[in-house]
């Protein structure tokens, strides 16, 4: 209630030391404080602010001991910046002026400062329960594959026909002799034999869906290389072991001359066998051999052979690796050759050739049965070739381990 401003009231103010100039707000309600002094009554805004402050303090106090605050304290053991003592989060929230202003007005920004260590929960991170994306290496790892070296020994010459013919001397009557002046000269005689080899076809194929070839990057290239390898591996088997029957090639081992075991004597080794084979070719006036094909087991048995005193016959393993067995003889290791067997011969083009009608080729087509309607394709690898062995006697085959018959 607004009191009436009278002379007596002013005198009372003067007596109490209240100046009139300081009481210009007396158009507002006034009240007496606990000391008996006149004070301006609180305005509605001040009353609302006081209520909000009381509400704020109540909220802060209720937040101080919530389960989340208690958990935060127990896990972090948060320390204040200065003294390293435990921080009282509730007290800091109540005393933060920017937060009080934000809760009072409903607008603005509240700033709370914490050290990183005050908030971190130190936990050892392990792979348990965490799904780690695996790293996919590019490409596909193929199965173990034999090194194909035999084809590299033989000269490859293209042909445009499906049949290769050649003439070889089957007989030669050598009647040359010294003659006297005006005497009749001896007459020589030669006989010839026509020989031929058909061009053979080697092929393989595999079906595949168009979708998998499109979706699996690199699969088509892998299938191509795998089919080419399978084709070349069979081609090498045919060159070495083909028996000439049906559509098989007539291989080198089939046409080679057997070793004359009478040359071995009684006390012999694998090295003796190969040496006697070279001798046999020389005695038959055949071209000097430049390669020998051995199974890896036999190669290393020869390479690591020792004498009676335990010394390596072909040099110590710490020395240079054995590149040739005898002089310029190229040693070709191949698992296509059975253990204990060998083939010795010449790669001279006058002795042996490969006539290639079609090199290894890959073709892909849907023209097979119902492949077009089923979105399937056929991938085919094919080659056509003839093995021409013009001098079969230039090759010797034999056994490295069994006693001669």
Image: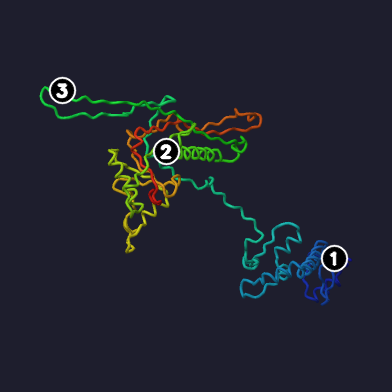
Q: Residue at x 62, y 36 (%)?
A: 209
Label total for image = 3
Kindly identify which residue carries mark 1: 29
Q: Tell me: 135 left or right of 105.
A: left
216, above or below 366, in the image: below
340, above or below 310, in the image: above
Q: Quadrant of the N terminus?
A: bottom right
Q: Nearer the viewer, mark 3 or mark 2?
A: 3
Q: Tell me: 148 left or right of 206.
A: left
Q: Nearer the viewer, mark 1 or mark 2?
A: 2
State the SS at label 3. Answer: loop
Q: Which mark is residue 92?
A: none
Q: Nearer the viewer, residue 367 or 123?
A: 367
Q: Nearer the viewer, residue 50 or 76?
A: 76
User: For the residue carrying disc 1, how many other residues have a C-alpha within 10 Å: few (<14), some (14-19), or many (20+)?
Assistant: some
375, above or below 396, in the image: above
**Alpha-carbon distance for marks 3 and 2?**
45 Å
Q: Earlier in the sequence, mark 1 or mark 3?
A: 1
Residue 76 coordinates in the image, percent (x, y):
67, 70
**Alpha-carbon distance for marks 1 and 3?**
167 Å
Residue 292 coordinates in the image, percent (x, y):
36, 45
State the SS at label 2. Answer: helix
Q: Residue at x 35, y 32 (%)?
A: 390
State the SS at label 1. Answer: loop
Residue 228 coordinates in the image, percent (x, y):
49, 37
User: For the residue carrying disc 2, how many other residues have a C-alpha within 10 Å: few (<14), some (14-19), or many (20+)?
Assistant: some
Q: Nearer the viewer, residue 396 or 208?
A: 396
Kindly identify which residue carries mark 3: 184
Q: Nearer the viewer, mark 1 or mark 3?
A: 3
State yes or no: discs 1 and 2 in contact (Cβ < 8 Å): no
Kindly identify which residue carries mark 2: 254
Q: Earlier in the sequence, mark 1 or mark 2?
A: 1
């Amino acid at each position: 209630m607004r009191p009436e401003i009278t002379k007596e009231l002013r005198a009372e103010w003067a007596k109490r030391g209240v100046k009139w100039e300081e009481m210009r707000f007396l158009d507002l309600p006034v009240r007496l404080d606990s000391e008996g002094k006149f004070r301006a009554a609180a305005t509605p805004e001040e009353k609302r602010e006081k209520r909000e402050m009381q509400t704020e303090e109540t909220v802060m106090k209720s937040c101080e001991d919530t389960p989340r605050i208690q958990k935060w304290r127990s896990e972090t053991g948060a320390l204040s910046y200065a003294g390293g003592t435990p921080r009282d989060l509730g007290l800091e929230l109540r005393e933060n002026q920017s937060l009080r202003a934000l809760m009072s007005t409903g607008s603005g920004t509240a700033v709370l400062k914490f050290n990183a260590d005050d908030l971190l929960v130190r936990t050892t991170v392990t792979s348990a329960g965490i799904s780690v994306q695996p790293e996919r290496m590019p490409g596909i790892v193929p199965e173990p594959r034999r090194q194909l070296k035999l084809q590299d020994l033989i000269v490859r010459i293209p042909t445009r026909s499906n049949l290769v013919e050649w003439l070889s001397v089957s007989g030669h009557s050598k009647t040359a002799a010294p003659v006297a002046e005006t005497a009749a000269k001896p007459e020589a005689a030669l006989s010839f034999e026509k020989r031929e080899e058909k061009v053979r076809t080697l092929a393989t194929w595999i079906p595949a869906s168009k979708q998998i070839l499109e979706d699996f990057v690199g699969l088509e290239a892998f299938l191509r290389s795998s089919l080419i390898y399978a084709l070349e591996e069979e081609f090498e088997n045919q060159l070495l072991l083909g028996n000439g029957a049906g559509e098989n090639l007539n291989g080198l081992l089939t046409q080679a001359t057997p070793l004359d075991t009478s040359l071995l004597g009684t006390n012999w080794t694998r090295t003796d066998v190969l040496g006697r084979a070279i001798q046999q070719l020389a005695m038959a006036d055949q071209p000097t051999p430049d390669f020998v094909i051995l199974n890896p087991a036999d190669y290393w048995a020869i390479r690591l052979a020792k004498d009676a005193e335990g010394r390596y016959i072909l040099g110590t393993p710490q020395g240079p690796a054995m590149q040739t067995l005898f002089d310029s003889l190229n040693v070709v290791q191949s698992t296509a050759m059975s253990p204990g067997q060998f083939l010795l011969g010449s790669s001279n083009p006058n002795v042996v050739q490969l006539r290639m009608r079609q090199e290894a080729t890959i073709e892909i087509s849907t023209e097979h049965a119902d492949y077009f309607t089923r979105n399937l394709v056929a991938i085919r690898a094919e080659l056509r070739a003839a093995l021409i062995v013009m001098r079969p006697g230039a090759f010797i085959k034999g056994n490295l381990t069994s006693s001669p018959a």
